[in-house]
Amino acid sequence: MLVLENINTYYGYSHILHDVSLEVKEGEILVLLGRNGVGKSTTLKSIMGIQAPKTGKITFEGSDITGLPPFKVARMGISLIPEERRVIPNLTVLENLKLGMLIRGKEVNREETMENVVFKYFPRLKERLHQLGGSLSGGEQQMLTIARALVANPRLMMIDEPTEGLMPLLVDEIGEIIKKLQADGVTILLVEQNYRLALGLSEKQRAYIMEKGHIKMSGSPQELQERHEEVEHYLGVKL
Amino acid sequence: MKRILIAIVAMGLVLGMSGAALADGAVFGTAVPLTGPYAAMAEDMKKGSLMALEEINAAGGVMGKPAKVIVRDSMLKGDVALRHFKDMAGQGVKFIGGNLSGGISLVANEYACKNHLLYIAYCHTSLPLGKEFCGWGFTAAVIPYQTTAALANFAFNKLGKKWVSITADYRWGHDILGGWLVNSKKYGGEFLGNIYHPLGTRDFSTYIPKILALKPDFIVLSNYGTDQTSAIKQFAELGLTKKLPVVISKTHIVTIKETGKAYNENVYGSVTFYWGLQDKYPEAKKFVQKFWKKYGQPPSADGEAAYVATKSLFTAMNKTKTTTDVKKVIKELVTMKLHTPKGINRFRACDHVREQSVLVVQGKGAKAKGWDVATVVAEVPYTETLQSCENNKKDIPYGAVKLPGK
Amino acid sequence: MFGIPVEVLIMQVIFGLALGAIYVLLASGLSIIFGLLDVINFAHGTFYMLGAYAAFMATSLSGSFWVGVAASVVIVMLIGAMTEYFLLKPLYGEWPFYPLLLTFGFAVAVPDLMKALFGLIGKVVEYPEGLVGAFIWGGVLVPKYRLFIIIFTAVVMIALFLFLKRSDLGMIIRAATRDSLMVNVLGVNTSRIWTTGFALGVGLAALGGALHAPMVSAIPDMGVEMTVESFVVVVIGGLGSVGGAILGGLIIGQVVSFVSLFAGEYSQVAIFFAMAVILMVRPRGLFGEAGRL
């Protein structure tokens, strides 16, 4: 579905991604693992067009999306839930969700989407609809950003560290939501530091491990478990 | 480094060359505010001055060589004007002139006094008054109080006795207000109150309730340029100019034009020249026709004053056969007849004020067509407006007035 | 009060409102532009001036003041859109002062261009028929044109608020004010939103210029102080806040009006004094951060 071929991305003069190649297959959960600052978020930003790669090629469902501006990438069916959540604080919850739906133009029935998509996944947002985004708690903000991405009806969702800074109870809840999303047919590219959660989500999942801007290894959770010493070397933690 | 050196040397060369050029022959170095709120008026001064120069040069120049007028932009700032005068004087220029601000005019006059240059002001100026007068300055227009004397005669006799005034809060405005107060007493007027406003005011409506509450017979407006335009337009907006006459201490043909319909028959102002005088003076006709043809618009009072100043100066140089001896030229200027568009005038020997009339004009409002924007309703001779030299020297009676709120 | 008849005080309030209305129009536009682009538009007064000139031209061509005002807003919005698209856009992301310098340069160059095109003499826009004069209402003189400006500005501001609060585009503008990258990631072409927002902001300035034109006549330098004064209003209200711009404009209108009554010569200085006092109490302005758009 999504293929990255040898992309190299820079911030100014510093070379962040080195010949990164990866593939996301339709229907799977692909997890990007690695320590802080190895280029996981940059990979997502490169795909989204926020930080376009200098060389290399990104194709999505057969079309070249390398260097397209974010809004065009979004219109291809990719949505990004960034690390900092980025709920629009001066818009209400409802408006944040409407913002997510804009991309679908007139085809979308807003009320119906609210009922069938938002409240199905996030019943808790119902009572918060008219509150300002900035007034929500961290967990609620995370749910809102996922819901906002979801109402755009993407085929690929890129989620950057969704559980960061959340209470354990909420972490599990987020995990459940991701599983549900996959079950509903959304392909997921996930960046996560919580390895236990990230590798135990689904049967149909794979992982890549990054270090210093390079892809070092990849495989299914089982395969990674078999090579756990190597994995632990890259991640710096016990699996 | 090398490039910088070359640049400095090049600049030095350019400056040096211009210096040599400036001091050569008959030169009149002027500064007027070509940018800023009075730019249109300053432009007119420049045109008047250049037209006089052209006439002089067409008639053989000064002592057989072409004369020169330098026109610099004072930006309506005293320090900028002074810098230009210093620069020109530093390059040998001995005759300076210009202005549009009474305050800057005094600065220029003071500089001329100290450095023994001849200075001619072609705007309202108080330089002949009290200790300002030093003998090196000339007034080609009038002293501010002269216009109030002319207008007061008209207003207190024709419009009523009770008046309020709106005055721009700076030196010239204060001088004018003093003039009105003196003349009010003379003609039995009743002064109801004054409002000072800062220069550059756009909204005058906020002053109107207070004025209306005082119930005057007429309003005296003492400001200039765009301030004047805004004030009259806003009086008209309220329907004020339909019933309540407005008397403008100093107006300008450009202001009348850009005020439009609002400058109607109930609005009066003073100028020292209006092109309509061409029906009265044959000299005016020649001047107006020529100016209009050359520049596409009639000359204003400012343009006329600059023309007279420039022409008189070069004529005096020709007569005395010197382009450097300032004292000789001064002596000639106060002896000779000035052939002006308003007929024969003179610079009064004792304080160098041009002996000329002041006009009272009336707006035409909706009947205005093109540049036909006003009617001359009175021409008051200088004998009725100008104080004696003794009075001017002591700055009485005008200088003795106590201004309200100051 | 201070021996001043109450009618005079009421009139003072009305004149202050009308004066404030012009500030409201300019400052709300300036605020939208700042909120969206993070650029203090030094050319705001220049667009106000262009608005007055466009009104002059359209009024003299069509013979109708109303056509003149409408055309002025449309023309200046187009000029604004082109300015943003061709001149400002290439400078975003570069050194943050580049866009600022550009608007500054625009504010210097365009008035000179206007001098070359239209000359130094002011252009007259006459008051619309029917709005000249005043009616007396309980001893209070109510000038028709001022009343019209107050009502018209109120309508425009309500429309602006409805637009910002109720329409999708308004919602996008509000969102982009806070986090334009995220809005872009959600599939909105924010670059176009910036152009739209800039055009909207200068359109409001043009409306101010067109409505002000009959009161002052159009001259090339008329925008200079207006830029400074509307910036003061925006600072009082809180940078980037439209609500703050409205409140700030109304406050400044009343300040000028009442200072004119008691000490006319200080009416302009009072604006800056009011700003200093308000900033001492609320350093981020009345509607500071929290109330942005």
Image (spheres, coloured by chain):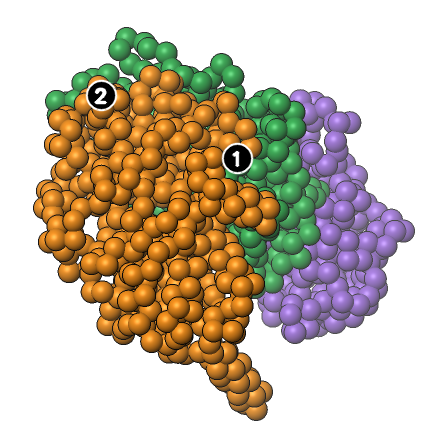
The answer to whether marks 2 and 1 mark residues whose Cβ atoms lie closer than 8 Å is no
Residue B332 in the image: state x and y as whole percent. Answer: 32, 65
The one of C212 and C197 positioned closer to us in this rendering: C212
Q: Which chain is purple?
A: A
Q: Amino acid at mark 2?
A: Gly
The residue that appears at 44% across and 78% down in the rendered structure is B23
Q: Which mark is residue A34?
A: none
Label 2 to label 1: alpha-carbon separation = 30 Å
Residue A67 in the image: state x and y as whole percent. Answer: 77, 58
| Subunit bearing disc 1 | B
- Whether residue A81 is situated above or below residue A19 in the rendered picture: above
Q: Which mark is residue B371?
A: 1
The residue that appears at 32% across and 40% down in the rendered structure is B358
Rendered hue of chain C is: green
Element type at mark 2? loop
Mark 2 is surrounded, within 10 Å at the Cα level, by few (under 14), some (14 to 19) or many (20 or more) other residues, namely some
Q: Which residue is mark 2?
A: B160
Mark 1 is surrounded, within 10 Å at the Cα level, by few (under 14), some (14 to 19) or many (20 or more) other residues, namely some
Let me know if residue B6 appears in the view. Answer: yes
The one of A7 and C222 positioned closer to us in this rendering: C222
Left or right? Give the position of B270 relative to B14.
left
- Whether residue B97 is situated above or below residue B345 in the rendered picture: below
Looking at the rendered image, the quarter that the C terminus of chain B falls into is top left
